[in-house]
Image: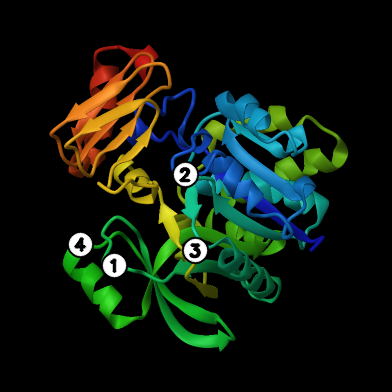
């Protein structure tokens, strides 16, 4: 697949994983399930046999570019693009499209978030291959994950008529629904979770940007011209980036495009969005406790405990807690309150404790 390029979006901050995740060391650099590799490293590793390392681009924050290169020494250093400022996913993809277009205008882009967990990697690779094949001939393609529950934290994709084996037309994208609508979506069988994975040729995306987001198209064209002529593309990007429309690729392009297709996937996809998800994916003992580090548990059930090897954490007579201990912070909360961790980060910022976030 010499015409295939991967674009990994790694610009998140991961405030829901405080205190392990910090602004200088965000979620994608962490190992949050039972894997040893970080989420970012797992995302790259899963591309083996599909995309050559020389064709894998990672778009991240400029402040995280060096750490990204350190985690992924197998990639050429120039394949890590450091955004001067966060502008959502559409500018990120426009910038990457310029780089792909400079190498191969009809190159197929496989756009992936950096931080999902995939349980069934062979099935995942099969879906990627089908989506790549569809993107070579179609306009824009996404992967929809078969829902296993009425989840209100995910967006959905409504599917229409079948077009090719395993490929269907997208009727619409739907924002995160309330529980009643989510239940209806799952019961109908016509809705899939929006995985945030997108597939298209570089020229197809640039044409959509020209029609939908002309400032991003002009930016991408300017980057491509400098790449082709040997100009200072990095300086041009740094100068232009803050002026670009800040919008997601979903809202800016995918929802407006006339011909979008979806490939169904069932491969154990998890959007690791909180310590609750990390607990669900972790290996547990007979009392449903998941532990990492030196831990002593007495009459304790359903807890996620993450500490260090040189300091013991002891829990007695408690249930369903999350305990995360680092050098300078300690988090203790009920598992059901995991979404409130971001409030701690907001509170610390208000106290001007910037070193702790």
Q: CA distance from mark 4 to mark 2?
A: 31 Å
Q: Secondary structure at mark 1?
A: loop
Residue 239 in view here = no
Q: Badge 4: how crowded within 10 Å, few (<14), some, or many (20+)?
A: few
Q: Secondary structure at mark 4?
A: loop
Q: Position of residue 169 (x, y in %)?
A: 50, 80
Q: CA distance from mark 1 to mark 3?
A: 25 Å
Q: Earlier in the sequence, mark 2 or mark 1?
A: 2
Q: Nearer the viewer, mark 3 or mark 2?
A: 2
Q: Residue at x 69, y 73 (%)?
A: 133
Q: Residue at x 69, y 76 (%)?
A: 137
Q: Quadrant of the C terminus?
A: top left
Residue 226: image quadrant is top right
Q: CA distance from mark 2 to mark 1?
A: 23 Å
Residue hosting label 4? 178
Q: Earlier in the sequence, mark 4 or mark 2?
A: 2
Q: Identify the disc placed on residue 173.
A: none
Q: Nearer the viewer, mark 4 or mark 1?
A: 1
Residue hosting label 3? 254
Q: Position of residue 104 (x, y in %)?
A: 81, 56
> Looking at the picture, does residue 213 appear above or below residue 316?
below
Residue hosting label 1? 149
Residue hosting label 2? 34
Q: CA distance from mark 4 to mark 3?
A: 22 Å
Q: CA distance from mark 3 to mark 2?
A: 34 Å
Q: Earlier in the sequence, mark 3 or mark 2?
A: 2
Residue 307 in view here = yes
Residue 127: image quadrant is bottom right
């Amino acid at each position: 697949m010499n015409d295939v390029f991967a674009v990994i979006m790694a610009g998140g901050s991961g405030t829901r994983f405080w205190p392990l995740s910090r602004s200088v060391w965000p979620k994608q650099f962490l190992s949050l399930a039972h894997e040893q590799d970080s989420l970012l490293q797992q995302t790259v590793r899963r591309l083996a046999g599909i995309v050559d390392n020389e064709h894998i681009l990672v778009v991240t924050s400029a402040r995280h570019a060096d750490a990204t290169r350190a985690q992924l020494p197998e990639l050429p250093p120039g394949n890590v693009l450091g955004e001067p400022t966060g502008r959502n996913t559409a500018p990120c993809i426009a910038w990457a499209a310029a780089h792909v277009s400079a190498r191969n205008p009809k190159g197929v882009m496989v756009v992936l978030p950096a931080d999902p967990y995939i349980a069934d990697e062979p099935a995942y690779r099969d879906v990627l291959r089908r989506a790549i094949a569809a993107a070579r001939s179609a306009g824009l393609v996404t992967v929809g994950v078969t829902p296993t529950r009425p989840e209100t934290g995910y967006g959905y994709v409504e599917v229409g008529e079948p077009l090719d084996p395993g490929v269907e037309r997208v009727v619409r994208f739907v924002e995160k629904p309330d529980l009643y609508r989510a239940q209806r979506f799952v019961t109908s069988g016509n809705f899939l979770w929006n995985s945030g994975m997108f597939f298209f040729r570089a020229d197809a995306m640039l044409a959509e940007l020209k029609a939908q987001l002309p400032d991003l198209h002009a930016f991408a064209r300017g980057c491509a011209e400098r790449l082709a002529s040997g100009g200072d593309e990095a300086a041009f990007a740094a100068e232009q980036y803050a002026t670009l429309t800040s919008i997601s690729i979903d809202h800016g392009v995918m929802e407006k495009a006339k011909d979008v297709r979806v490939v169904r996937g069932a491969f154990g996809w998890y959007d690791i969005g909180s310590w609750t998800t990390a607990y669900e994916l972790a290996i547990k003992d007979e009392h449903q406790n998941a532990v990492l580090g030196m831990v002593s548990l007495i009459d304790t059930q359903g807890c996620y405990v993450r500490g260090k090897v040189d300091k013991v954490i002891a829990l007695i007579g408690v249930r369903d807690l999350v305990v995360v201990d680092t050098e300078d912070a300690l988090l203790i909360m009920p598992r059901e309150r995991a979404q409130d961790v971001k409030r701690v980060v907001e509170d610390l910022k208000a106290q001007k404790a910037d070193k702790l976030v």
